[in-house]
Amino acid sequence: MPVLYRKSRLLRRSRVLWGSLALWRPRLIFWFGACAIGIISVGFARLADLAQRAFAGITASGEWGFLLPLVVTPLGFMLSAYLAARYFPNAQGSGIPQAIAARHLRDPEDRTRLLSLRLVFGKIVLTVLGLLSGASIGREGPTVQVGASIMLAVARFGGMAQARGLILAGSAAGIAAAFNTPLAGIVFAIEEMSRTYESRANGLVLTAVILSGLAALGLAGSYNYFGSTSVAPASLRDWELVLVCGIGGGALGAAFSGLALYAGQHVRRFAQPQPLRRMVMLAAVCGLAVAAVGILSGGTTFGTGYDQAKGAVEGNPLPLLFFLEKLVAGFLSMISGIPGGIFAPSLAIGAGFGSTVGQLMGSGIALAAILGMAGYFSGVVQAPMTAFVIILEMTGDHEAVIPIMAVSMIGYITSRLLSREPLYHGLSRVFIAAAIRARRARELAES
């Protein structure tokens, strides 16, 4: 009898232990995935910086080096568009619309067409290739798709059923690690990715942001994206900037997003008969135009625009037409079909717009650049809370909290009056529709 009792106790203990392992396995995989997002984001950032410096070095070498973009940029665009269409479908563009679309799809196979570890590799490589070619793109939007893809893989490997919540968590972690803005990552997930507050996902989002942020901090250290500044309105003219940057930035952002959605429809119709060939041709034309704009601007429109935006935030005025030149370069890069985001270029456009307004009104350049970023970025994404929090965290300008909030809200209202469709959500509907068509075609083929 005592022997049987001891055996039963051992059996119960083994069951408890096995149950504990089964309980902790998905948690450990989730934590590992969150840390992986932070590590990969830092590596992605460093590769992107190296690519930009390499392009700048190539174009600065020799007497005629400034003309090299006329060859390098179109060829790079063509190669990136070809590889994306041929080997990494759904890697094109920012990556945020793909993550939004995946949250609306219920079929696991449809989701993995938009978010997968294969796409993580392709997105990083092709975004770096675009920056190496001088494209006016950023890495922050792609980092969202990378983070969401990693978390969807976590759901699959860990046997977790919360795919939608994990995609949300991965997207938030991607933004937080890319900009070193943990609060902005959380607000972005709630306001832009889901458009609603999901209490069931808040724990996942917070944990993913914390772990990815800690991993990124361990590798890159603590920093503000644009450094630290402390400027605030000091006169009536400075307060006038709030209205001008809010209304003007919102209208400019609405024009960009509306034109991007309109052009996207025509590009899809144009590419329909021969998608691979025609998209490569379009990429070549867009690459040549981006190169021409870059040469005319003295090279300021190539790449993310980080240096130009940072300089403006530090009080250095940008050329008066820089924001228009950067907008054109960013728009051409976007419709070309190459992978790459619009986050960083949008901040550069907004900083350029604010710098121009500040020079014309005789106000401080640093304050005008920060308000210009808030107004334009809010106008493009139509997410005022995200715009306010992300710019506040990137600049550390706590002296201008109220002006930044006001500009973000004015930019949002102006944009909504002019363009009813938010850019990322408008683009996500394209991926949702494509996934539905593909599933119906599979079902017809099987029947």
Image: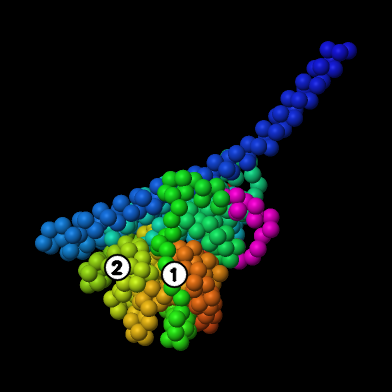
Query: What x and y, as percent, mark residue 352?
Result: 35, 74
Of 243 and 109, the residue lying toward us: 243
Q: Total label count?
A: 2
Displayed quadrant of residue 12 = top right
Amino acid on which disc 2 is placed = Thr
Residue at the location (22% across, 69% down)?
298
Residue 92 seen from this side = no
**Callout 1: SS:** loop
Point 44% across, 84% down: residue: 235
* Lower position in the chain sequence, tag 1 or tag 2: 1
In the picture of the structure, the residue carrying the numbered disc 1 is 230
Q: Is residue 200 magenta?
A: yes
Q: Is residue 311 visible?
A: yes
**Residue 426 colored in magenta in the image:** no
- Magenta residues, start to end: 193-208
What residue is disc 2 on? 301
